[in-house]
Amino acid sequence: MNGAESLLQTLVGCGVEVCFTNPGTSEMHFVAALDKQEGMRSVLGLFEGVVTGAADGYARMTGKPACTLLHLGPGMANGLANLHNARRARVPLVNVVGDHATYHRHLDAPLTSNIAGFAGPVSGWIKASESAKTVAADGAAAVAAAMTPPGQIATLILPADTAWGEAIEPAAPLPIPRWPAPSSTAIDAAAVALRSGEPCALLMNGAALGERGLTLAGRIAKHTAAQLFADTFVTRIARGAGRVDVQRVPYFGEQAAEVLAPFRHLILVATKAPVTFFAYPGKPSELTPAGCARHTLATPEQDALAALEALCDAVGARKVAPVVTAAQRPALPRGQLNPQSAAQTLGHLLPENAIIVNEAATSGFAIPASTAGAPQHDWLDLTGGAIGQGLPSAVGVAVACPGRRVLALEGDGSGMYTVQSLWTMAREKLDVTAVIFANRKYAILQVELMRVGAGNPGRKADEMLSLDRPDLDWVKLANGMGVPATRATTAEEFNTQLARSLAAPGPSLIEVAL
Amino acid sequence: MNGAESLLQTLVGCGVEVCFTNPGTSEMHFVAALDKQEGMRSVLGLFEGVVTGAADGYARMTGKPACTLLHLGPGMANGLANLHNARRARVPLVNVVGDHATYHRHLDAPLTSNIAGFAGPVSGWIKASESAKTVAADGAAAVAAAMTPPGQIATLILPADTAWGEAIEPAAPLPIPRWPAPSSTAIDAAAVALRSGEPCALLMNGAALGERGLTLAGRIAKHTAAQLFADTFVTRIARGAGRVDVQRVPYFGEQAAEVLAPFRHLILVATKAPVTFFAYPGKPSELTPAGCARHTLATPEQDALAALEALCDAVGARKVAPVVTAAQRPALPRGQLNPQSAAQTLGHLLPENAIIVNEAATSGFAIPASTAGAPQHDWLDLTGGAIGQGLPSAVGVAVACPGRRVLALEGDGSGMYTVQSLWTMAREKLDVTAVIFANRKYAILQVELMRVGAGNPGRKADEMLSLDRPDLDWVKLANGMGVPATRATTAEEFNTQLARSLAAPGPSLIEVAL
């Protein structure tokens, strides 16, 4: 048994079932070990941003890590942007990054680089294996580190000689640390606030936005008249008819401030104090209103469900029936195809138990409302602002959840970042409907240019914010990677094409021409 | 004048003429400043790997830096792989990386990350500007750092408030350090070796591979019977009829060792001691033969041309006429289209003064020989082994050298990494002929899997090394980004399509179906 085989057996023993990869020469023994190892599915991405984004989506749906297999420093580097998003999503993820053999590194061959340096800003745990005999134990430690609440990125650097050298045996799984319980002081303080008669809001993310968390929060809200909010961008939220609905904090600071202004108490559940996404000249960055007290019921690292249970009891809401969303779908639209009408179509057709991967940016503003009363579904956001996460995440989500329809709602600008994802969808025959909102611009930047006070764009600035000249043809791009595709130019066309895509097994893409 | 304007004026004053960019909200003041600034061309890439690879290609042809404009940590991260290649090419390059306003960073908003951490492994110089009043001076320092021989990557982090805050005035250019002269000891030692009567080889890279360097080396070779070698992968080399030809050190270690075995003296000119690209079990990593003395005539950081001049004089070769390559082109091939016949077509049709950007990997083995006697041209390689450099580099090369035909010779696997480059070629109407060698696999890895002793690939391993199921359709991919494209399946078709592409202004792509 060589080191790669001992590592792979260890990972499988620790519950890792999928390896998203783009390997190179230094990873060939790991690839060969994949051949022999039952229980580990390997999925190829044609660029590492696909690989790491897929591992993020997979972890959001399963709560456990996939492993990535990356080729030295540059392979790691190509995956960093989506690892940044995964870090912000607080998901478990194990990177295995091949490196030169330990005795080769000092020679500074062309692919030599500071892998740990690249990995540092995104990783909660990093280790470079030193010997084939310790690789297995390092792998078990990596999984335990990744699973440490709330979930983090563990990066294991695997020098080629530790992969091909003689190993001893696989390592046993390590115990996974439990979620720390919230403090009783925090629960008491939140309960006091809720009973104060002053306006209260709960701001939530993480486990609080799962079905159980929302039910508990809904009971508290019904009983105390508190309002429920979720962060602007969430790791995952359970939505749809029969579930407790929560309002999102708006993206733009002025709107967020307006929404939060009425409250004297802000109770944080698995999230941090709200801040604007960017700074704007002369405008506040912090969104907690003046005179509003903040109470951290549970930090993102603490057990939010236990905290909500305890708070529910503390305010006497245990048996309260929460307000849930009524089943309601918009009518199918006719005529012009625009973000509003496209949202109606999505709300009308969204299948039971679907998973929405949302990176639609400015084109997606109407979709939350239009899908609120649709059949129950999960919704995932871009958590770290590094665009190019949606299509890769959809790959991982679909691998994690066979039998469920995945809707990847993408902007054209963000979609181009990791467009190679479409090929993996085709190869793995994933049930993904990719909807590309093609407005042929970085529309958010045209807004932001003015919001930051940089003035109206002239010709050169406009060119840097536009995706036209030439226009992208998403039907050809998708077909070029083996994904069937159509273009919708009217609401009726989108109605027909979306219905057809949702019913067809495997991936397909619809370009929504805006 | 705000900070962004002062920085941009400073950069232009320092000779920076092109900004390759993908900006975001935190860079909007820089984008607005671009609008007002004469003398700075801005070129949009739809992914940052395009942006940094283009800056590398631009620097290789002009010897001076372009600037990139990147969006916070993830924008920097997406550009790192090609910055790794640029670092290995030892070219000057200035990154301007937007960041949150200084007072916003501690709030840990979603896009906050350790930008300097990401940038560290590739940057020779890093600074985060602290005030709008110092941004201009920081910009001048960044250019001087980038231009410090042999050329390096300078990364300037630009917090949004230093861009929008009130500045004083642009900063004047700083003096550029000269290339350090080689030591007379080194020249004497090399001369002694060359006069020893023992077999000598010169191994060269950097400036030694320009027209002047090759002529000097050719005089020495003719006079002393030394043999001339270039590194396996070079930053740039002048080639073609009437120029001094040099042999490349082969990629595979066994072949490299065989080629270098006869020599007792290895004289290094602007390069380091040769090593294998990867380590292989039980095989040596160092390629200097046993019993062969190494002499560093000039390090990569020293003035290689001065060193060659001095060595030429020291061995009395100043007036020697070097052996130059005779004008000779292969005949146009017929029948099967394969790497050999495609190389013949390229050799037959290569236009005068063309620039070859080579990332053809295993499909390109025959092209150096088939083009050796073609009209004079420049040839650029993938220097750092991080694939996905060829198409972006071709963008920058074409921006740098209007009027010259650029041939981007790409593998299909590497081409997919930064396929978004095609769109920039179309938007900027660049005279690029992209030739995609479509063998539908990572062919090098199929070789390497066996070379590292990992055995024959089984089904799962084979799937990780193959690009088929589904096949990529490069004609559709190119058309989807506005680039005209054709597919060649016979030698005759490639002959016709290449001739047509070379004659047509603007970009076009040919898929060579292997």
Image (tube, coloured by chain):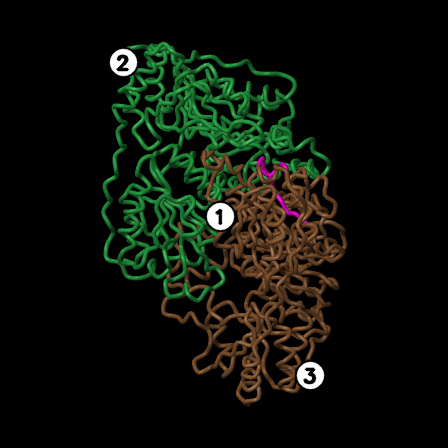
Chain colours: A brown, B green
Q: Which residues are magenta?
A: A18-29
Asked if disc 3 and disc 2 are in contact, CB closer than 8 Å, the reply is: no
Q: Is residue A307 visible?
A: yes
Alpha carbon separation for disc pair 3 and 2: 95 Å
Task: Estimate the spatial distance between the alpha carbons at disc 1 and disc 2, rounded to whole Å.
Answer: 49 Å
Q: Position of residue B110 (x, y in %)?
A: 49, 62
Which residue in the structure is indicated by mark 1? A116
Q: Secondary structure at mark 1?
A: helix
Q: Splitting the image into 4 quarters, where does residue A148 fall?
A: bottom right
Is residue A21 located in the magenta-colored stretch of the structure?
yes
Labels 3 and 1 touching (C-beta < 8 A): no
Left or right, A398 with reference to B28: right
Query: Which chain hosts label 3?
Result: A
Crowding at mark 2 (Cα within 10 Å: few <14, some 14-19, many 20+): some
Q: Amino acid at mark 2?
A: Arg
Q: Which mark is residue A318?
A: 3
As shown in the figure, which amino acid type bears the numbered disc 1?
Ala
Q: Which residue is mark 2?
A: B318
Q: Position of residue A13 (x, y in %)?
A: 70, 51
Q: Quarter of the image containing the C terminus of chain A?
A: bottom right
Residue A175 percent across, percent down from the top left: 65, 60
Locate residue B288 relative to residue A484 in the image: left or right. Answer: left
